[in-house]
Image: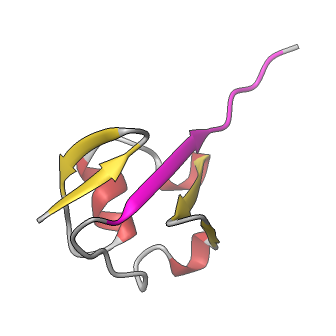
């Protein structure tokens, strides 16, 4: 199964949390949108991925 993450085709995982972990993202430091809908952080593990899903992952960056 493939999904698109930030415009790149990737091998899909079972859920959002697994996908983030596989790609090296810290789930506590990102925001995720799946097919145009924000996924609440508490729902990452409960949100399944299906073939063709599109994820946008945004990292939080500190600075000033």
Query: Magenta segment: does it hold 57?
Result: yes
**Which residue is farthest bottom?**
46
x%, y% of residue 36?
59, 64
Determine whether 8 is above or below 13 in the image. above
**Which residue is farthest top?**
64
Which range is magenta? 53-63
x%, y% of residue 24?
32, 40
Determine whether 35 is above or below 11 in the image. below
Q: Is residue 1 left or right of residue 59?
A: left
| Residue at image location 57% in from the left, 60% down from the top | 33
Count of numbered marks? 0
| Residue at image location 36% in from the left, 53% down from the top | 20
Query: Magenta segment: does it hold 23?
Result: no
| Residue at image location 35% in from the left, 66% down from the top | 53
Determine whether 52 is above or below 23 in the image. below
Q: Is residue 24 left or right of residue 25?
A: left
| Residue at image location 34% in from the left, 81% down from the top | 48
x%, y% of residue 62?
75, 25
Determine whether 56 is above or below 51 in the image. above
Q: Is residue 16 left or right of residue 42?
A: left
Locate the N terminus by quadrant: bottom left
**Which residue is farthest right?**
64
In this view, the residue in front, 45 or 13, is 13
x%, y% of residue 51?
21, 70
* Colouring method of the image: secondary structure
Locate the C terminus by quadrant: top right
In this view, the residue in front, 8 or 64, is 8
């Amino acid at each position: 199964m493939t999904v698109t993450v930030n415009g790149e085709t990737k091998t899909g995982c079972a859920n959002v949390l697994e996908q983030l972990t596989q790609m090296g993202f810290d789930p506590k430091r990102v925001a995720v949108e799946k097919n145009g809908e924000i996924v609440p952080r508490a729902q990452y593990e409960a949100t399944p991925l299906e073939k063709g899903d599109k994820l946008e992952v945004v990292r939080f960056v500190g600075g000033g």
